Image (tube, rainbow, N blue to C red):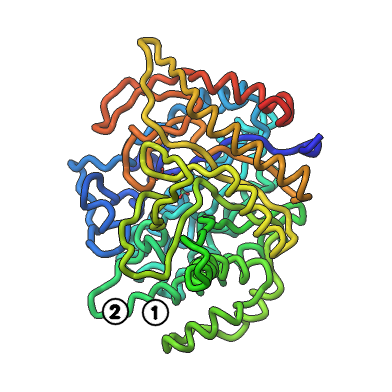
Amino acid sequence: MAFKDGFLWGGAISANQSEGAYNVDGRGIANVDLCPTGDIRDSVLMGKTKMFDFDENYFYPGKAAIDMYHYYKEDIALFAEMGFNVYRLSIAWSRIFPNGDELEPNEAGLQFYEDVFKECQKYNINPLVTISHFDVPMHLVKEYGSWRNRKMIDFYERLCRVIFKRYKGLVKYWITFNEINMVLEAPFLSSGLFIEEHEDAELVKFTASHHELVASALATKIAHEVDSENMVGCMLASIAPYPRTCDPKDVWKAKQVENQSYFFIDVQVRGEYPAYTLKELERKNIVLPFKEGDRELLKQHTVDFIGFSYYSSSVVSADPTLTDTIGGNLFPSLPNPYLKSSDWGWQIDPLGLRITMNNIYDRYQKPLFIVENGLGAVDVPDESGYVEDDYRISYLSEHMRAMRDAVEYDGVDLLGYTVWGPIDIVSASTGEMKKRYGFIYVDRDNQGKGTLKRSKKKSFEWYKKVIKSNGQDL
Ligand code: BG6
């Protein structure tokens, strides 16, 4: 048996991409609410176009999303029917602290998540909670400049203290920041950072990264103090960069791109900045905003497990004239002639998952958790909402085989696996509903039209069988 007893099988979503109810029960507006659709979206996500004022009349895809705020009981029942024993979701910071800098939390927001976790408990589903899945209350963005400001650590700490205490006994698994390395690629989406023209973008991003890393270590410390049962993880957007050729220059380039992401995890797992990052920053004249106590905090409060997302591998080259990149989770990649791509140009590479698992496990020897993996595709439902999504089954089963090989043949210690978007939700990179990952179809389109009715796709029964057989029947 490749997967140990108690292996965690489930799915993962984020608050902003699913809940909707953007202004219900005292919720405040967050950066993720302001991400528009269309051509301008990329520039907003990258922190290049400023969109700070929420327009009630504008169609933001996350505004209503799939209204999980009101449908969560129905949705969790469907997850339970598939056999989930873990459900990854995120807390919307602005439900708990609408502005972010209040001294007291919003009780209605706290109660909502308590109800959700109790619903999970009914079915013996472990919540795996992402504390910040890209979201920052807009008030903190406008008044404090978001994570470029050290005060953010205090606001985040306050959030952590409140939720760890309130959900003690209901939640054991936590992730401090979703895809923490995304701050370098999409600073506004990931961390609420708009880069002003006069600013040094690298300096802003590395300053914010340091604050997030310190906040993450502090959260880990508090989580363990509040409940020694708590398991806290970091979360990497893994991109598996391959060199385009065996030219050592390409190999070196791939290594550098990989390090750009690994440095965050090096800090969260090893407790200190790696030499290659310190040297790079020194060359760029960037001084990290270390304060007294940061070094000890980072060193003493490292994570218990390493969560990561994996959708695709990527290809990089040292040749600056090769600029014809294709899609891939906001990280640019050159085409790989050996791989097929998804409807959105993300290259499909199951073996890349095994390679990634080996790379991370060899580097850190800590338990891994695959907290996102899946295929965003165009689904065509019949009249009842049924979708014959054999392409999704094939993507997932191939990735699960690779994951099984990594466990069975390579000895990687893996805690669990959560498929991204077990129910169709709004896409983070494009804002579309059309890009669907789910086992459950939701009747809603890119313009926000539809009944929101949920229906099972073919992959629903397939995943149920996978879980029942603990990953043997793929
Ligand atoms: C990850 C994010 O980057 O990829 C998710 O953590 C996101 O929030 C997922 O949804 C898939 O990306 P997309 O753009 O297809 O939704």
What's the residue at 58%, 52% (across, down)?
A: 308
Q: Position of residue 224 (x, y in %)?
A: 72, 60
Q: The N terminus appears in which quarter of the rendering? A: top right
367 sits to left or right of 322: right
Q: Is residue 99 visible?
A: yes
1 or 182, which is in the foreground?
1
What's the residue at 72%, 61% (across, down)?
A: 362
In the image, the residue with mark 1 has its CB under 8 Å from the nearest atom of ligand 1: no
| Residue type pointed to by label 2 | Glu
Say the numbered circle drawn on residue 203: 1
Q: Position of residue 23 (x, y in %)?
A: 33, 42
What's the residue at 73%, 59% (across, down)?
A: 366
Q: Label 2: how many residues lie within 10 Å, few (<14), some (14-19) or many (20+)? A: few
Instruction: Write down the quadrant of residue 216 in the picture.
Output: bottom right
195 or 332, which is in the foreground?
332
| Residue type pointed to by label 1 | Leu
Q: Position of residue 192 (x, y in %)?
A: 36, 62
Q: Does residue 360 sit above or below 208 in this rendering?
A: above
Say the numbered circle drawn on residue 199: 2
266 sits to left or right of 64: right
Q: The C terminus appears in which quarter of the rendering? A: top right
Q: Does residue 298 sit above or below 42 in this rendering?
A: below
What's the residue at 37%, 13% (across, down)?
A: 382
Residues under numbered marks 1 and 2 in contact, where contact means CB atoms less than 8 Å apart: yes
